[in-house]
C-alpha cells in the first residue's frame, strides 16, 4: 500500500504529479477554461463579494496564504487569511456579502469547523475546500470544491498542500474569469500553465538525490531558518512546519525582508538558512540582497533556485534546483524540495515519519 516506499509520506510526495493531474482532470479543459462544478452556480455571487476571508489551520493555512497572493493579484478582491482558532474567538466582523473559505484536508478540524459555523450564522456565503469526501466541513459549508488528491495517510501534509494550492489556483482563475480581471488570452494561457505544472513538479522530484545528499549533511543541525518573499513566503512557513513536525528540529519560516528586524541575530555558521530564489519573482534582486545579509554573517546558505541559474553555485553552501515556473506557480514547484529535505532529514534521524510524536492526522479538539 506504500507503493514500495518505506513511508506513506514519501509515497505521497512522489505521487504528486499524478494526483494533481487527477485533481485538475475535467476541471481545466483543453482551451484552458476552468470548470468547478460545485461552485459554478455561485460564481456571480462570489464575484460580487467585497472581501474573501480564508480560515484554516497548519498547512492548510499556508495554502490559504498562497491563495491570498493568487486571488488578490488575479481577481483584485481583498483577501484576509486567518488561523481559524483566532478568527472564531475575536468576535470577527463578518458581513453578508463576505465569502468565507474554509480549507481543510480532513474536513474535521474543530477550529475550522467552528469558523464555518460562525460565518454561516453571520449570513456569509461559506465555501469548503476539503479533501475528505462527506466530512463535516464538506457537509456544513454552502458549497465547495474537493481536492481529489486521494487519501493522505502521512500525518505531515504534502500532497494535500499542493492539492489545495492547485484547487485555489483554479478557483482564482474561475473568479478572475467571472470578474473580468484577466483577459481571455491570459486566462487561457494561465489555465494551461497550471495544468502543465505537474511536469514542473515531476522535474523538481527528479532532483530528489540532491535533497537526499543535503539532508545527510544537515541531519545534526539544531535549528533551520526558511526565507521566502511574495508567493514563496508561505512556502517558507510550510517548509519550516514540515521539518519541525517530522524531524523534531526547530525551524522558523520568515518573510525574507523581515530577517533584519530580528532573526538576523541568530545567524551563524551552524544554522542552515534555506532561501527561495526564483528568477521569475519580481523581487529577485531583493532576495539576492537578503542572501548577502546571511552570507556577510557567515551564515550557512542553502539556495533553492531555477534550473539553468548558476548564479549561486559558488556562493552558497548548497543549491537545490527546480524547473523554472511563472511566479504564481512557483509555490507548487518550490515546496517540493522542501518536502524532500524534511523527509530525508527525518529518515536519517530515524524518526517515526508517518506518525510523529504528539501529532494526530486530524485535530478534532480545539
Ligand atoms: O485537516 P486539516 O487540513 O484541517 O488540518 C490542519 C492541520 O492540523 C494540518 O495541516 C497540520 O498542520 C499538518 N500536520 C501539517 O502537516
Image: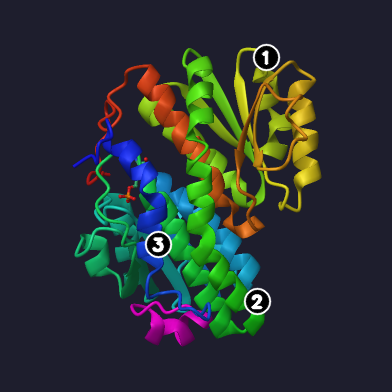
Query: Residue 213: percent from the left, percent from the top?
Result: 51, 22
Closer to the camera in the image, 62 or 189: 189
- Marks 2 and 3, Cα distance to the nearest angstrom? 21 Å
Residue 91 shows up from this direction = no
Within-10-Å neighbours for mark 1: few <14, some 14–19, many 20+: some
The earlier-in-sequence mark between 3 and 1 is 3
Query: Residue 211: percent from the left, percent from the top?
Result: 51, 29
Residue positioned 47% across, 16% down in the render: 219
5 relative to 202 in the view: left or right: left
* Disc 3 target residue: 21
143 relative to 97 in the view: left or right: left
Marks 1,2: beta carbons within 8 A: no
Asked if residue 38 is among those painted magenta in the image, a careful observer would answer yes
* Disc 2 target residue: 186
Camera-side mark, 2 or 3: 3
Marks 3,1: beta carbons within 8 A: no
The earlier-in-sequence mark between 2 and 3 is 3
* Disc 1 target residue: 268
Residue positioned 67% across, 45% down in the render: 229
Q: Secondary structure at mark 3?
A: helix
Closer to the camera in the image, 73 or 284: 284
Q: Is mark 3 within 8 Å of ligand 1?
A: no
User: In the image, ligand 1 is in what quadrant?
Assistant: top left
Work out whether 173 lies above or below 272.
Answer: below
Within-10-Å neighbours for mark 3: few <14, some 14–19, many 20+: many
Q: Which residues are magenta?
A: 34-47
Amino acid at each position: 500500500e506504500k507503493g514500495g516506499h518505506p513511508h506513506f509520506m514519501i509515497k505521497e510526495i512522489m505521487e504528486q504529479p499524478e494526483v494533481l493531474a487527477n485533481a485538475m482532470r475535467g476541471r481545466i479543459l483543453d482551451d484552458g477554461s476552468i470548470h468547478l462544478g460545485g461552485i459554478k452556480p455561485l460564481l456571480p455571487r462570489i464575484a460580487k463579494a467585497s472581501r474573501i476571508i480564508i480560515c484554516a489551520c497548519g498547512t492548510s493555512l499556508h495554502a490559504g496564504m498562497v491563495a491570498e497572493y493568487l486571488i488578490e493579484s488575479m481577481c483584485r478582491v481583498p483577501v484576509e487569511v486567518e488561523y481559524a482558532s483566532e478568527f472564531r474567538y475575536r468576535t470577527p466582523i463578518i458581513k453578508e456579502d463576505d465569502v468565507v473559505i474554509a480549507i481543510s484536508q480532513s474536513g474535521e478540524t474543530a477550529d475550522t469547523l467552528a469558523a464555518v459555523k460562525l460565518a454561516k450564522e453571520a449570513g456569509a456565503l461559506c465555501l469548503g475546500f476539503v479533501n475528505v469526501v462527506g466530512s463535516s466541513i464538506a457537509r456544513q459549508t454552502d458549497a465547495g470544491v474537493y481536492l481529489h488528491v486521494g487519501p493522505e495517510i502521512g500525518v505531515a501534509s504534502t500532497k494535500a498542500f499542493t492539492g489545495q494550492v492547485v484547487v485555489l489556483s483554479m478557483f482564482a482563475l474561475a473568479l478572475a474569469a467571472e470578474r473580468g480581471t484577466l483577459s481571455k488570452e491570459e486566462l487561457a494561457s494561465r489555465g494551461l500553465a497550471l495544468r502543465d505544472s505537474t511536469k514542473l513538479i515531476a522535474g523538481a522530484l527528479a532532483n530528489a538525490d540532491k535533497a537526499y545528499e543535503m539532508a545527510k549533511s544537515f541531519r545534526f543541525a539544531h535549528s533551520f531558518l526558511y526565507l521566502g518573499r511574495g508567493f514563496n513566503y508561505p512556502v517558507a512557513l510550510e517548509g519550516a512546519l514540515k521539518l519541525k513536525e517530522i524531524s523534531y528540529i526547530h525551524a522558523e519560516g520568515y518573510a525574507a525582508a523581515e530577517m533584519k528586524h530580528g532573526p538576523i541575530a541568530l545567524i551563524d555558521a551552524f544554522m542552515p538558512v534555506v532561501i527561495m530564489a526564483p528568477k521569475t519573482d519580481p523581487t529577485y534582486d531583493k532576495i539576492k540582497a537578503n542572501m548577502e545579509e546571511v552570507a556577510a554573517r557567515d551564515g550557512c546558505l542553502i539556495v533553492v533556485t531555477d534550473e539553468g541559474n548558476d548564479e549561486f553555485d559558488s556562493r552558497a553552501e548548497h543549491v537545490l534546483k527546480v524547473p523554472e515556473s511563472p511566479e504564481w506557480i512557483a509555490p507548487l514547484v518550490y515546496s517540493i524540495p522542501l518536502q524532500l529535505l524534511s523527509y530525508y532529514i527525518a529518515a536519517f534521524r530515524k524518526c517515526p515519519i508517518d506518525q510523529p510524536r504528539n501529532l494526530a492526522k486530524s485535530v478534532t479538539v480545539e
